[in-house]
């Protein structure tokens, strides 16, 4: 018991600084710097709005991440349900008073930037479920009550985000939630059953999709169907990436982006611009950087004593992975176009905030990896 | 410790399941990298091309047409700098203000303003509107003076076709103008090189030689953005001017022809009897082809179209005329060749000839008395040729006539409007009219009336081939690689005719000589029909045959009235014809002259020949000295 108490004792400030995962920190920092350069390129080689805005967000959120890291992981454990509920409330607020833009109501005005609560939900759901599976007994994981509870936890935000409407984010929330379920020990057969149910209900789901969403799926299946209309984005994106070649066209020399052929180059298609200018080598380099980050997070999860930390780190690592995979598959023409940003690289405050909070909690888990949570 | 045990078991589950996902992650990342590799490395070229296609836009500029020059290298169809006025809508600050300014400056009509507004709505804002295609120098200066006030206006200097000799060459060259869609699609080269504002040949050699004259486009490459706006110029590829085409025609002679015809309906052709070079080919009246370049005005067009003298018809090639008495040398030659008559054969002319109750009149009512071949030709006695034709028969006559080029196109494919004419025979009538040949028809065929239809150029060729001793020549209007001097051509005839039957048009050279002598006497001996137009100086002396082709049957009453030409309505007057060659000693040139409704050949057509021969023969030395400076392969 004595040892136990000692481990639960708060670390001093310098101990915490010492315990930070510097490899992870440096990788995140490098990625941030890189994202600034790419943003500079999307502004046409000038420091304009996007670069400035991206930079100022970075200046705020990077210290925020460190700050979060310095809070004990136990604190985050205790805070998890509250955080989830708070984000749900924000979602409700947004659905009534949110800012409407291009047909969907996702944002709330925070004066400094427009917050998109659904992005925060990507983290909140992992936190919430991690806490749930941390607390629930392994024997009860597959009980009906348990399953129903977690399904409710996942479905509430998904339905709210879908109604905004925002298919991309809700898919990402769903996959983040499902992965924690998987890690928590929900039986494989449930996953298989629900997958079969999903396949069967797919035609009905599709019939509920908005016309533009159906169009996206059709376009994904055949981008040349309407090369100047719906297929335009994916075709131009593939041209940009393909024309980058092995070494790329060079920094600030991506003709596709410079001459405005690329759509949404600041946000979802940022990788396209990066890949056009830095080529295959640069793209693989970026993936390696992401991989380092993911592996570091997984390692932190693996060394964590508490299952909460472990579940959160594994879940968050997977979420990051999913964001990357969905975004890249989309710009590479492997998936239909759903709005999904590339972590850190894409322009967008909410996405960056959510990712930075996630990194902060991971770093906190690292600092307190010996900590047990009751 | 139960909870601790549970926690450890939970940790195991989490770790195991994480491992499974970890493996899945590696596979998926590998898949993405593979996709990246396939796009960026394997298919790089394809996408690089697509990306260039995106960003690089080519602007073709109109090609510069090749010049057409006369035999001496004078440009007869060239290119001229013209000043144009363009508006670039995206640079205009106030479109309405600009239009009112331009309207007062250039006196633009309301219709024109309407057109500008219309094209502004049709074009993209960075595409220029052509306000004026051909701005006068003074207007150009005016615009330049007020340029500070005319924001968005661009004075442009460009190149346009120009015909410096205006109406002199219209029927040979034709003209260029804006093509319609069909015309673009009809020619692959045009289709490929077409740019708005480009003009193509609509008629004549400009049309036939389109692919030689057209030239290649200059290409400007620009980098454009996604909205098609030019960002910067990349490179400029120069175009090649079209090929230069040199004609065999002599501008001085051609001009003289126009002057001599003096806007009467008619045509003159002049040909080198050895080389077949066409020295002149003029159809009158003509019109100014420059008027068509920028779209002819309605007034000008209706003036040309409604002119009763039919300036739009190329009479030299597409005008079909009864040859009248100009056919007589061929009739005589045919009779001699077929040994129907001898030079001493005589016919008594009483002014008319009866056949099966039908009367065939000689032009001389009182008759010529006993005439031999030479005298019959000299005085153009119809009765003699009725009799000869009767003895000869139309089929044998047809063989000789066709040998000498009647009934088929002279210049082949160079002019699509050229007509082949007709020289009848019994089979032709049977096949085409379904009736048998009547002997009376042979008689009138013998004096160049009836079914026979010839173009002036055919008559010229026929005369040339009699003049050169009866050898076939291939007329040409374009100087090509097969250019030989006339001496070479002359020598070649005899050589070639030894091997080729086609080259030699006669059986007995004496017969040609007899016909030539008869033609000589017709011009140069007393009582000859063109005696009044003779030139005694042997340098210019020529031999010819007049012809007066009836355009309608002369009734008995009219014959008795013996009307003067002024008393007959224009449309009913005879066509005046004359064919000739000269100089009589060592002939070089043949010509044919037709004045529509000009009355008699001797009074109207022959005097023109007199003027013309002086000029042609005076220019002969010049022509011989002219070096063959440039030829193209056509």
Image (cartoon, rainbow, N blue to C red):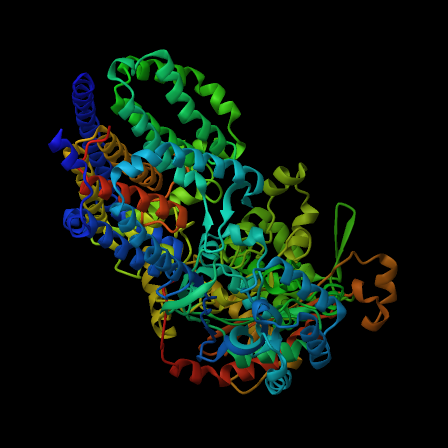
Q: Residue at x 33, y 28 (%)?
A: A129
Location of residue B561 (image quadrant): bottom right
Query: Residue A360 at x, y = what percent?
Result: 27, 45
Horizontal arrangement in the rendering, residue B359 relative to residue B560 (left or right):
left
Query: Residue B162 at x, y = what percent?
Result: 55, 75
Depth check: B411 or B341 in front? Answer: B411
Location of residue A185 (image quadrant): top left
Depth check: B554 or A117 in front? Answer: A117
User: How many marks do you count on the picture?
Assistant: 0
Residue furthest front as drawn: A2
Q: From what the image shows, is residue B1 above or below residue B524?
A: above
Query: Residue B480 at x, y = what percent?
Result: 38, 67
- Which quarter shows the C terminus of chain B? bottom left
- Which quarter shows the N terminus of chain B? top left
Horizontal arrangement in the rendering, residue A14 relative to residue B113 (left or right):
left
* Residue B121 in view of the camera: yes
Depth check: A18 or B510 in front? Answer: A18
Q: Residue at x 53, y 31 (%)?
A: A210
Q: From what the image shows, is residue B533 above or below residue A352?
A: below
* Residue A254 in view of the camera: no
Query: Residue A301 at x, y = what percent?
Result: 19, 34
Depth check: B611 or A308 in front? Answer: A308
Horizontal arrangement in the rendering, residue A344 relative to residue B172 (left or right):
left
Location of residue B433 (image quadrant): top right
């Amino acid at each position: 018991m004595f040892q136990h108490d000692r481990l639960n004792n708060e670390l001093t400030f310098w101990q915490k600084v010492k315990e930070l995962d510097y490899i992870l920190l440096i990788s995140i920092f490098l990625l941030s710097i890189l994202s600034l350069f790419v943003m500079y390129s999307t502004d046409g080689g000038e420091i304009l709005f996007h670069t400035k805005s991206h930079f100022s967000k970075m200046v705020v959120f990077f210290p925020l991440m460190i700050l979060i890291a310095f809070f004990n992981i136990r604190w985050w454990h205790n805070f998890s349900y509250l955080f989830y509920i708070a984000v749900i409330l924000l979602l409700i607020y947004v659905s009534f008073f949110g800012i409407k833009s291009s047909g969907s109501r996702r944002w709330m005005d925070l004066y400094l930037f427009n917050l998109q609560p659904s992005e925060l939900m990507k983290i909140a759901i992992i936190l919430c479920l991690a806490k749930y599976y941390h607390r629930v007994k392994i024997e009860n994981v597959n009980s009906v009550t348990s399953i129903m509870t977690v399904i409710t936890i996942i479905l509430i935000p998904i339905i709210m985000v879908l109604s905004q409407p925002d298919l991309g984010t809700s898919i990402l929330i769903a996959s983040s939630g499902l992965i924690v379920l998987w890690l928590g020990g929900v039986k494989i057969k449930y996953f298989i059953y629900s997958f079969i149910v999903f396949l069967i209900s797919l035609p009905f789901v599709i019939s509920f999709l908005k016309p533009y969403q159906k169009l996206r799926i059709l376009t994904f299946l055949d981008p040349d169907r309407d090369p100047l209309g719906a297929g335009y984005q994916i075709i131009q994106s593939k041209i940009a990436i393909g024309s980058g070649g092995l070494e790329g066209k060079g920094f600030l020399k991506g003709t596709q982006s410079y001459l405005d052929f690329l759509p949404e180059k600041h946000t979802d298609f940022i990788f396209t611009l990066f890949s056009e200018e830095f080529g295959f080598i640069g793209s693989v380099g970026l993936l390696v950087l992401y991989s380092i980050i993911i592996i570091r997070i997984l390692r932190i999860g693996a060394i964590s004593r508490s299952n909460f930390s472990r579940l959160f780190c594994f879940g968050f690592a997977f979420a990051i992975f999913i964001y990357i995979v969905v975004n890249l598959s989309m710009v590479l023409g492997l998936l239909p176009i759903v709005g999904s940003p590339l972590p850190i690289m894409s322009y967008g405050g909410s996405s960056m905030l959510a990712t930075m909070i996630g990194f902060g909690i991971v770093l906190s888990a690292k600092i307190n990896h010996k900590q047990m949570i009751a | 410790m139960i909870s601790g045990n549970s926690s450890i078991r939970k940790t195991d589950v989490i770790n195991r399941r994480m491992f499974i996902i970890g493996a899945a992650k590696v596979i998926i990342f590998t898949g993405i990298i593979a996709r990246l590799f396939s796009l960026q490395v394997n298919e790089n070229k394809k996408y690089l091309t697509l990306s260039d296609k995106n960003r690089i836009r080519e602007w073709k500029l109109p090609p510069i047409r090749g010049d057409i020059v006369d035999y001496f290298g004078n440009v007869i169809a060239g290119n001229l700098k013209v000043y144009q006025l363009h508006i670039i809508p995206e640079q205009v600050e106030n479109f309405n203000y600009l239009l009112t300014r331009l309207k007062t400056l250039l006196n633009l009509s309301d219709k024109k303003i309407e057109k500008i507004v219309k094209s502004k709505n049709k074009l993209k804002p960075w595409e220029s509107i052509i306000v004026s295609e051909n701005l006068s120098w003074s207007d150009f200066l005016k615009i330049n003076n007020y340029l500070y006030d005319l924001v968005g206006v661009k004075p442009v200097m460009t190149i346009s076709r120009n015909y410096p000799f205006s109406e002199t060459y219209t029927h040979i060259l034709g003209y260029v103008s804006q093509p319609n869609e069909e015309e673009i699609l009809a020619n692959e080269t045009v289709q490929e090189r077409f740019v708005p504002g480009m003009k193509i040949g609509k008629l004549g050699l400009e049309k036939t030689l389109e692919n030689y004259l057209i030239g290649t486009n200059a290409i400007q490459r620009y980098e454009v953005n996604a909205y098609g706006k030019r960002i910067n110029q990349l490179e400029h590829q120069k175009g090649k001017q079209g090929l230069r085409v040199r004609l065999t025609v002599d501008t001085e002679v051609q001009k003289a022809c126009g002057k001599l015809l003096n806007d009467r309906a008619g045509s003159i052709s002049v040909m080198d009897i050895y080389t077949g070079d066409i020295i002149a080919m003029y159809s009158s009246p003509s019109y100014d082809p420059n008027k068509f370049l920028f779209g002819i005005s309605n007034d000008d067009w209706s003036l040309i179209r409604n002119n009763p003298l039919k300036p739009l018809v190329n009479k030299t090639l597409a005008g079909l005329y009864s040859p009248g008495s100009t056919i007589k040398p061929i009739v005589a030659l045919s009779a001699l060749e077929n040994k129907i008559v001898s030079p001493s054969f005589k016919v008594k002319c009483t002014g008319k000839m009866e056949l099966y109750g039908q009367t065939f009149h000689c032009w001389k009512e009182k008759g010529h008395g006993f005439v031999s071949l030479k005298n019959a030709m000299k005085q153009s006695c119809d009765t003699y040729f009725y009799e000869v034709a009767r003895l000869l028969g139309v089929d044998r006559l047809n063989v000789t006539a066709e040998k000498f080029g009647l009934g088929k196109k002279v210049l082949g494919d160079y002019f699509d409007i050229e007509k082949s004419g007709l020289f009848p025979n019994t089979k032709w009538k049977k096949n085409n009219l379904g009736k048998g040949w009547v002997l009376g028809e042979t008689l009138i065929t013998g004096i160049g009336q009836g079914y026979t239809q010839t173009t002036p150029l055919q008559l010229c060729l026929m005369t040339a081939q009699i003049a050169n001793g009866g050898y076939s020549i291939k007329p040409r209007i374009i100087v090509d690689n097969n250019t030989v001097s006339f001496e070479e051509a002359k020598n070649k005839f005899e050589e070639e005719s030894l091997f080729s039957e086609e080259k030699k048009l006669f059986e007995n050279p004496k017969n040609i000589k007899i016909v030539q002598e008869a033609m000589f006497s017709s011009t140069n001996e007393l009582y000859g029909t063109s005696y009044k137009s003779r030139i005694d100086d042997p340098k210019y002396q020529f031999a010819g045959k007049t012809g007066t082709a009836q355009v309608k049957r002369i009734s008995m009453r009219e014959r008795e009235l013996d009307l003067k030409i002024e008393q007959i309505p224009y449309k009913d007057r005879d066509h005046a014809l004359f064919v000739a060659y000269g100089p009589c000693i060592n002939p070089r040139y043949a010509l044919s002259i037709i004045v529509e409704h000009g009355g008699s050949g001797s009074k109207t057509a022959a005097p023109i020949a007199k003027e013309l021969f002086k000029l042609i023969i005076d220019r002969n030395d010049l022509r011989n000295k002219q070096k063959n400076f440039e030829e193209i392969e056509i």
